[in-house]
């Protein structure tokens, strides 16, 4: 299927561009930072084109759009799978793909993996929608680059499609084939890891939402509690574990989700490094030592 190749290619390109943006000052100063990193960004573009590029911003609370659009895509996808598996009938997405694409590469993921994977990602997106509107408290003045906004919307839509595109032919043919009801160790491990990471990500987001005790938009504190005791950005680590759990579910045979995991690790590792430098530049060494008595890794416990 050409759409699978297109999504994987886009994710690989984005991964390379993220590394380039982190290495090149002009892109680092104009595109990379967002939220509080952009609100207090000491790195300024030195060229006209980069300065103009840095002005293409949207409010940071638009992050919620990622999850809303992703959840809508997931609901449409659930309807698509229900009609394919129960009535052997395509809805909008597959009718469009059958008209302009092929079914090549849509047989190597099982029906069970498609259903469980889509269910898990739908749960993740539902939780993030709830957190975005009722838990998180983004600054009204914080912004992100427009490229982040477009990439975020595309990423979550791609991940939803990625849970079932590579097995859609098996879903469609399920009426004429015996069903495999064996729930293997990989599936159980994936679900447990997903729930474990989701719980801690929720805890970390709740801690972050309580940080700003002052009404001053520019007031920030150092987060404490839960995984923040060992990591600078534990909510990013939880995100990596969530996409790792999905890859375990698919036994690392789902190409879109493999590329999505790679992009997630690279992108969030870069942002976590920027976050650590922000802490070091905005808090005194004494305060950091009090908050991090044993030091903290950026994003991966004991490694990085």
Image (cartoon, rainbow, N blue to C red):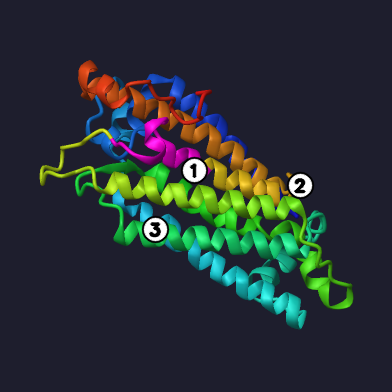
Q: Are marks 1 and 2 in contact (CB under 8 Å)?
A: no
- Name the image quarter holding residue 163: bottom right
**Residue 123 appears left or right of 51:** right
Please tell me whether residue 116 belongs to the stretch shown in magenta: no
Residue pointed to by mark 2: 253
Q: Residues within 10 Å of mark 3 (few under 14, many from 20)?
A: some
* Real-space CA distance between mark 1 and mark 2, rounded to the nearest whole angstrom: 22 Å
Relative placement, left or right, of 84 versus 267 is right
Horizontal and vertical percent position of residue 174 = 82, 73
Looking at the image, residue 79 sits to the left or right of residue 71; the answer is: right
What's the CA distance linking mark 2 and mark 3? 29 Å
Helix, strand or loop status at disc 2: loop
Disc 1 designates what residue? 238
Classify 10 Å Cα crowding around label 1: few (below 14), some (14-19), many (20 and above).
many
Secondary-structure class at tag 1: helix
Image quarter in which the N terminus is found: bottom right
Question: Which disc is residue 65 wearing?
Answer: 3
Q: Is residue 231 magenta?
A: yes
Which mark is first along the chain, 2 or 1?
1
Task: Kindly state the secondary structure of the residue where label 3 is placed.
Answer: helix
Give, as a single range, the part of the protein colored magenta: 223-239
Disc 3 from disc 1: Cα separation: 20 Å
Residue drawn at (65%, 59%) of the image: 117
Mark 3 or 1: the one toward you = 1
Mark 3 or mark 1, earlier in chain: 3
Q: Looking at the image, is mark 2 or mark 3 nearer the viewer?
A: 2
Quarter-wise, where is residue 244 in the image? top right
Q: Residue furthest top?
A: 285
């Amino acid at each position: 299927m050409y759409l699978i190749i297109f999504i994987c290619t886009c994710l690989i390109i984005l991964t390379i561009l993220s590394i380039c943006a982190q290495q090149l000052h002009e892109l680092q100063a104009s595109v990379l930072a967002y939220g509080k990193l952009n609100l207090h960004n000491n790195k300024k573009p030195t060229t006209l084109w980069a300065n103009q590029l840095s002005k293409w911003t949207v409010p940071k609370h638009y992050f919620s759009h990622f999850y809303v659009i992703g959840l809508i895509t997931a609901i449409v996808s659930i309807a698509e799978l229900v009609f394919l598996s129960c009535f052997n009938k395509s809805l909008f997405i597959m009718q469009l793909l059958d008209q302009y694409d092929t079914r090549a590469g849509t047989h190597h993921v099982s029906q069970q993996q498609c259903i469980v994977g889509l269910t898990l990602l739908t749960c993740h997106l539902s939780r993030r929608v709830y957190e975005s509107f009722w838990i998180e408290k983004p600054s009204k003045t914080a912004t992100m680059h427009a490229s982040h906004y477009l990439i975020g919307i595309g990423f979550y839509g791609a991940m939803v499609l990625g849970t079932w595109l590579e097995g859609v032919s098996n879903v469609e043919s399920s009426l004429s084939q015996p069903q495999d009801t064996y729930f293997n160790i990989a599936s159980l491990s994936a679900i447990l890891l997903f729930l474990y990471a989701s719980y801690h990500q929720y805890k970390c987001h709740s801690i972050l939402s309580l940080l700003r005790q002052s009404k001053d938009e520019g007031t920030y504190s150092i987060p404490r509690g839960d995984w923040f005791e060992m990591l600078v950005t534990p909510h990013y680590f939880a995100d990596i574990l969530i996409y790792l759990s999905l890859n375990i579910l698919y036994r690392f045979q789902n190409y879109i989700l493999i590329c999505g995991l790679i992009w997630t690790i690279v992108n969030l590792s870069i942002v976590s490094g920027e976050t650590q430098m922000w802490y070091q530049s905005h808090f005194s060494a004494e305060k950091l030592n009090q908050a991090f008595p044993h030091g903290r890794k950026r994003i991966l416990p004991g490694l990085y």
